[in-house]
Amino acid sequence: MRVHSARAFAITTLLAATALLAAPAWAQHGPPSLAQLKGKTAGQFFKNIKVLNNVPATKLIDGMHYITMALNVRCEFCHNIHNFASDQKRTKRTARKMMRMLFAIDKDNFHGHTVVSCYTCHHGYHRPIPAPLPGGMVATAPMPGPVMPRAQRLRLATGTHLPTLNQILTDYANALGGREALGRTTSRVLEVARSSAGSRRPPIMQKIYEAAPNKLLIVTQYRGREFRTGYNGSELWEGTSRGARQLWGMEAVVPSREAQLDPLAAIQQLQGARVVGMARIGDHKTYVVMGRTAGGMPERLFFDTETGLLLRRMMIYRTIFGPLLFQADYSEYRKEGGVAIPFKTAWWGGAMGWTETVKSVQTNVPVKETEFQPPASHARTPQDGPR
């Protein structure tokens, strides 16, 4: 959705870091590719599958991510990380029982729809929570991340009416600087500092390159190594000078949607977009717009009733065990190159939180098309960078 494309790397990094889930060799070679998994069930591709045999292989890893987040555990809680197929750990055998129970509850009571999930009982603990917690104790749950102000639904006063979607988007375009200014923006380069919630470590610096209409490159220097995440308009990838791999599933939730210089373009691509009501976020009243991506993923957008600017974006990604929320709160809008962009974004995704702050912005600077291609697609020396 543009401006927020810089935020894409935060999520892809988070997910890639926990993606080594089902085979010892992945520790060296990374997770399997989409091409390897496509058309196969989990039982056909992975070893020693007892419950999820008929689940598409492409859905299994996302489901494992969901469990780690719902219980706030790591892969080794259930798995022998040197032999993921092993049934050595009791927790893995217990997890299978819980999966069968979960599927039975949803089948018998909710027509097979995923309503009751792991998080329904666990709430971020590795053991289920058997009783309501006293007030304030919920905050002690070991779930990292910022406390996002909840959106409180507002009732419309008698005789008042909601604006149309076109009116809201027109106000948004004007608040950003106008459609002409948006159309004149052909590229942007940002320096961004990413700080993890509750961490005392220095922020990670990233350089983000964007080009119209939907190309994106994020370059991150971390512990002496350079990591790149890119989108060339059709292919989403991450890699280093050694090569790249395609991003898919949960890893691709945000980047492909965020790779838009013009934020209106992403909103206008939503299917069935409509105004559904009003809500209060902190001191701000907002109009709430809801729609679905081409892939069927629900999104909610919250627009400030006074400024017209986008304050919050929520995306729901559904796994085989339950939904995951990705949420961004945008603030400190300033105009650069005639277009307003949020200089601060608080992200919450996958039970983790981080804040991203824009340090500098350059507009309409030359960026080579080849920079948005995976490293293996074009020659590059280690000293080369986007130009």
Image: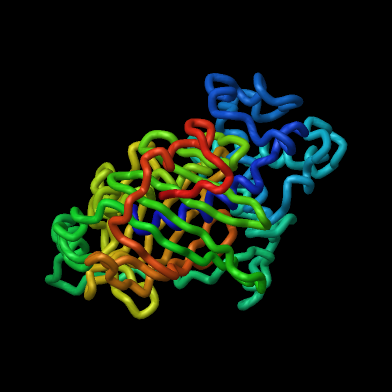
Q: Is residue 331 visible?
A: yes
- Residue 322 in picture, x, y percent from top left: 55, 45
Closer to the camera, 293 or 153?
Answer: 293
- Residue 74 in picture, x, y percent from top left: 73, 50
- Asked if residue 129 lies left or right of residue 265, the reply is right
* Position above or below: 104 against 276: above
- Asked if residue 259 lies left or right of residue 196, the reply is left
User: Residue at 28% of width from left, 56% of height from top?
Assistant: 364
Closer to the camera, 106 or 239?
Answer: 239
- Asked if residue 208 lies left or right of residue 283, the reply is right
* Position above or below: 363 against 99: below
- Colour scheme in the image? rainbow
- Residue 228 in picture, x, y percent from top left: 53, 47
User: Residue at 69% of width from left, 25% of height from top?
Assistant: 46
Q: Residue furthest bottom?
A: 283
- Residue 131 in picture, x, y percent from top left: 68, 64
